[in-house]
Image (tube, helix red, strand yellow):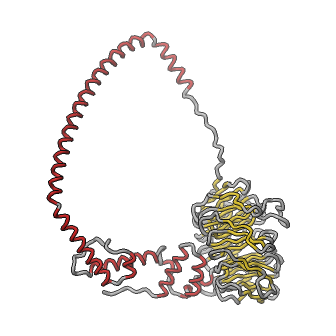
Amino acid sequence: MTHSTITSTELNYLVFRYLQESGLTHSAFALGYEAGINKCAIDGNQVPPGALITLVQKGLQYIELEANLDNTDVDADDDFSFLQPLDLITKDVNELQQIIKAKKKEKVQKECDKDKNKDSMIAQDRDQQFESERVRERQDRDAAQEKEKEMMEVDNEQEREKEKEEEKEKQHVESKDKTKLDEHEVSRVGPEQMDITPSSQSLACEISRSEVTILEGHSSEVFACAWSPAGSLLASGSGDSTARIWKIPDGPCGKDVQVLPPNVHVLKHFKGRTNEKSKDVTTLDWNGEGTLLATGSYDGQARIWSPDGELRNTLVKHRGPIFSLKWNKKGDFLLSGSVDKTAIVWDTKTWECKQQFEYHSAPTLDVDWRNNYSFATCSTDTMIYVCKIGETHPVKAFSGHKAEVNAIKWDPTGSLLASCSDDGTAKIWSLKQDKCLHDFKDHSKEIYTIRWRPTGQGTNNPNQQLVLASASFDSTIKLWDAEQGRLLCSLNGHRQPVYSVAFSPNGEYLASGSLDQSLHIWSVKEGRILKTYKGRGGIFEVCWNREGDKIAACFANSSICVMDFRM
């Protein structure tokens, strides 16, 4: 028999796809980078979803089938239930054949034992059958008698009805005119009206596709999107090795609004072939003035672009994919975090590496500035470090998470640091007190991202309550009182993992995007959905424009949707 083989490269690709389809994005990136997935000649479009699981199942079925068909001592049949999955994995074919042989002989012995009792069972069945027939005969006879009785009752009832009809006929002749008048009144008045009371529960307003501007042009998933702080430009980053800058027209959004060249610029991260997976755009960020866009790529390079799509600089020093990229508020430094376990601060005047921070023992997943000179990093090593330019050691080291830390965010004042993890918890750390102030454990699955409400000193909403939002794979969003350390409410409108949340600039609303293809807009005060939009793909990121009157969402089906928001 000729045996089919699978190469290590093909197996690596199947595992890579399995991790992607399971939502384990970081693990997929790491495997893809280390195994050189981008260099293999496999056409991903030819590999169906769930290929790895299918392959394993078919392999187990093949071993099971082979063990049965090669067994010559006992005839093979269609019942393959003699083997357990653990047997198939841990034993070779000869051992499996012996298991089948022994269990089939045991089955044959049981069949013989059954034959010994067969005669007595047949006799018992005959007695039972005879008794059953007697019972049925008695039931039929009783039923016939009951039916005859019912027929007599019906005849008597019909006789009584006939007498009543004759009496009614006499009365009908006498009151004919009055009856007609009564019928006329009923016809005019009609049936009694129902009391319809409107529901006290206000329903969410569904945003129709006709009210949405759909931006098309990417040829793969769109992982990131961000509005320019300076105006109507929207940037998007995709798995097709490009980023795009879209100029969104003023006025209402709608299906008839199109954004075409010259109002869209394609930022190519490749030379030649357009499907280089090593150049997926994984993250992007505008500087504070909206004059430069930074993009991070799977190839480990950061690129700097002008608003009209011109490549200004390429920053090369990381040795692995860049997962996070942030400008400081002043705009003189750019911070990047990479799978190579390091974070780099780039001087935006010279575009040279100002300092590389090598504290983590595993991939760096997120970075966030505290002020213009200090920042925090988090990693799959479960650690969080607070760093400062010029310092050779961390200013602070926070430990407490039990699994990889997916995201970190400083509150608007820079005094509290929030973190979330695959351990299902979100935590708030105090730099001054050097400890974890609050440990939130109400989520039942991994927490993918967190966001602070834009409030406090130096914001447009200084008097609002300080609130932290956390989005989880348990399909919920939870709002936390950051000062009291308590759960304010749980937003339960999604049905699949929530990948992104974003507060409106005025802090009164929260947008959320999920793999269930829905974008919800919530009232923070009331904890309910105000508006909702159903797209055609999982949502990876949502964001508000500076004015807070437009929302953008990027989808797994390679599109970006822009919609208006007014209350």
Report the residue that reaches farthest toward the right. Answer: 458
Residue 469 in the figure: left or right of residue 329? left
**Above or below, 249 relative to 322:** above
Q: Is residue 155 above or below residue 19?
A: above
Snapshot quadrant of residue 279:
bottom right
Q: Is residue 266 visible?
A: no
Q: Is residue 30 left or right of residue 118?
A: right
Q: Residue at x 32, y 18 (%)?
A: 160
x%, y% of residue 63? 34, 80
Direction from residue 164 to residue 477 in the image, left or right: right
Quick one: 242 or 476, which is closer to the camera? Answer: 476
In-front residue for pair 208/31: 31
Query: To which quarter of the image does residue 168 belong?
Result: top left
Residue 305, horizontal then vertical, whole percent: 74, 81
| Residue drawn at 16 percent across, 56 percent down | 122
Residue at the image position 80 percent from the left and 86 percent from the top: 391
In the rendered image, the quadrant that contains the N terminus is bottom left
The percent coordinates of residue 544 (x first, y second) are: 73, 65
- Count of labels shown? 0
In this image, 88 relative to 447: left or right? left
* Residue 171 visible in the current orientation: yes
234 to 478, vertically: above or below? below
Name the foreground residue: 360 vs 349: 360
Give the image location of residue 252, x and y in percent: 72, 59
Residue 405, by quadrant, is: bottom right
